[in-house]
Amino acid sequence: MPFTSRRTASPTRQAPGRPRPAAPHRLAALRRAAPAALAVGALLAAGAPEPGPQGIGDRLYPHLGNPGYDVDAYDIALKYSGKNDVPLDAVTTITARATDHLDRVNLDFTRGAVRSVEVNGLPARHATHGEDLVVTPAHPVEPGQVLRIVVRHTSDPKGAKDGGWIRTGDGLVMANQADAAHRVFPSNDHPSDKAVFTFRITAPRGVTAVANGLPLGRSARGPATTWTYRSLHPMATELVQVSLGRSAVVRRQGPHGLPLRDVVPAAERTKLEPWLAKTPGQIAWLERQVGRYPFETYGVLLADAATGFELETQTLSLFEKRLFTMDRIPAWYVESLMVHELAHQWFGDSVSPRTWSDVWLNESHATWYEALYADRASKGKAPMEQRMKRAYEQSDAWRATGGPPAAPKIPEKGQKVSLFRPVIYDGSALALYALRERMGAAAFDRLERSWFAQHRDGVVGTGDFIALASRIHGKDLSGFLHAWLYDTRTPPMPGHPDWHVKKDQKETGSGKARSS
């Protein structure tokens, strides 16, 4: 989600399928780092009388996620009335496998009314505690046991100012990063627990429903149509997208016959077509950098909404429509933002962060390829080296305000997206630039391709990246990268002794993330 501003024409950035990894190992690693979450789990297993929120101990979002199970699949059925002030009727079916003994099962869920819950076909008691839905099955669940949880609930788009449903001029879209998916549907709302998704969306005739993945068909019954979609690769909850509106779906082919579909306001399809036609070339360019596109389809969703950001929802990136209709923004700059969200399909979507402190792995790479593309597309107006030098000058101020790239400061109270500050974007891309200067261009390019190839559809942490970089370089880079990723002051830039950090400089570009 790059930080950008469109108040002027200036391109200067402002603050912003299977195979699956062994999920129990992912969650076990997180729990080892979160003794508080383990303690809560132990109390629950012992039959503690007072259930409450749990969380898996993420340093930045401590109440997200839930210990004791790993989700394999979500089946989400939504019924939309066509009115944005009316809650959607919904049924969320979660298929999971228990990794611990569970007397109770916690789900992340808020901003909806729960009518009933079933676990493995039997009615289950449920209660809301904070932003957790605490479910008590008829029988305790043992490790290895399959869990099929069916929650009948509503999903309320009213008052959606902090993520989840976003109202558009003609309907709804989703923006769930970082902690808002559970404001739409019950889930294990943490990127370490990826799953496949099926969507069954019923909407009035005249409304087009689109979701992540490939369409499986649609059926009309009376005045409504039901649309079905399925993802073929595991996906984090923060990357879920459902679009409802009077939209046109524009189809074409990308490289290797990849099916592309863009979702735009139907009345502006022709006007927006020149922008949509750029995606195949952008995919081909990124494939030359890092390898084959990782998913079953791609496209852009141009929403008639003032979100203040763009977002890399998996296979269907969300953009504000007005980004493509404001004449004062250079075309190369808009294209570079398109590449930023596209690059996230490799970095952040296919290769996902183990904790939210690892989010620099997403944004540094997306910013890196955004900047490379801008260097090429701007014909010398936005050289990569100049951009990195400006970032170096500001880096200490960014670190002072937002923390180092791999240890960002906890989001401000009531402003959870304040995690996405400049240090996560250009400040983290700067660390990649330093690594490239240290390793050399050829070795760095091997690292980038190997990072994606080895971790496709997986979940990773900062330590994994440091280990792979060291292996490819042939020397231990842990000390070098630790300084760039964790120190409060910016280290010297290899190969550029003339670069200096500006003293007493205030952070520029702070605020809500522009694009993720």
Image (cartoon, helix red, strand yellow):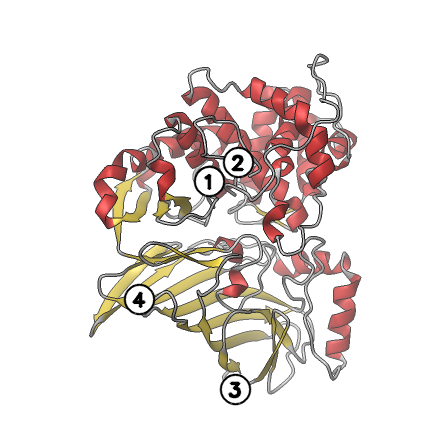
Name the front one of labels 2 and 3.
2
Nearer to us in this view, 3 or 194: 3
| Distance from Cα at disc 4 to Cα at disc 2 | 35 Å
Apparent side of residue 143 relative to residue 118 in the rendered image (left or right): right
Give the spatial CA distance, label 2 vs label 3.
45 Å
Query: Residue flagged by tag 1: what amino acid is it?
Result: Glu
* Residue found at x 66% / y 35%: 468
- Compare marks 2 and 1 and give the one earlier in the sequence: 1
Foreground tag (3 vs 1): 1
Residue picked out by circle 3: 122
Q: Residue at x 77, y 34 (%)?
A: 487
* Residue under pointer 2: 366
User: Which label belongs to residue 341?
Assistant: 1
Secondary structure under badge 2?
helix
Q: Which of marks 3 and 2 precedes in the sequence? A: 3
Disc 2 marks a residue whose amino acid type is Ala
SS of the residue at dot 1?
helix
Callouts 3 and 1 close, C-beta under 8 Å: no
